[in-house]
């Protein structure tokens, strides 16, 4: 039950980020899943604090899912 509560909180946080800053959130997910080329142009959109934050479980899950299956 605790896991579901943490996952829902994390999902709500990611959805809020997608609404508030869609380009930065999508670019960060693609950057950390190695689907975005390493470029200075894209690097300015990447928000490293989103991924370093350990409480954002859904973002980590999404990045690892894309790394494995894309």
Image: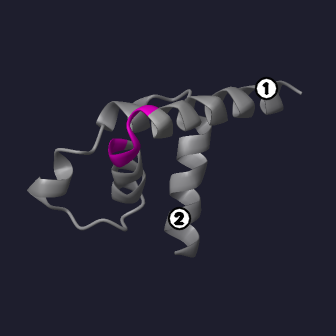
Q: Residues within 10 Å of mark 1 (few under 14, many from 20)?
A: few
The residue depicted at 10 percent of the width and 55 percent of the height is: 40
Q: Is 11 above or below relative to 31?
A: above
Residue 49 image point, x, y percent: 34, 30
User: Which image quarter: residue 37?
Assistant: bottom left
Between the C-alphas of marks 2 and 1, the distance is 23 Å
For disc 1, the marked residue is: 5
Report the magenta stretch's main SS: helix
The residue depicted at 42 percent of the width and 60 percent of the height is: 33
Q: Residues within 10 Å of mark 2 (few under 14, many from 20)?
A: some
Residue 57 image point, x, y percent: 60, 37
**Residue numbers of the magenta segment:** 20-24
The residue depicted at 61 percent of the width and 42 percent of the height is: 58
Residue 2 image point, x, y percent: 83, 24
Q: Residue furthest right?
A: 1
Q: Which mark is residue 66?
A: 2
Image quarter (top left, top right, bottom left or bottom right) of the N terminus: top right
Q: In the image, is residue 63 part of the stretch drawn in magenta?
A: no
Residue 7 image point, x, y percent: 71, 34
Q: Is 37 above or below relative to 28?
A: below
């Amino acid at each position: 039950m605790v896991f579901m509560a943490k996952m829902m909180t994390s999902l709500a946080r990611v959805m809020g980020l997608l609404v508030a800053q869609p380009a930065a959130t999508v670019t960060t997910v693609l950057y950390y899943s190695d689907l975005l080329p390493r470029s200075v142009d894209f690097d300015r959109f990447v928000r490293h604090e989103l991924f370093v934050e350990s409480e954002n479980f859904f973002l980590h899950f999404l990045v690892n899912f894309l790394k494995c299956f894309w």
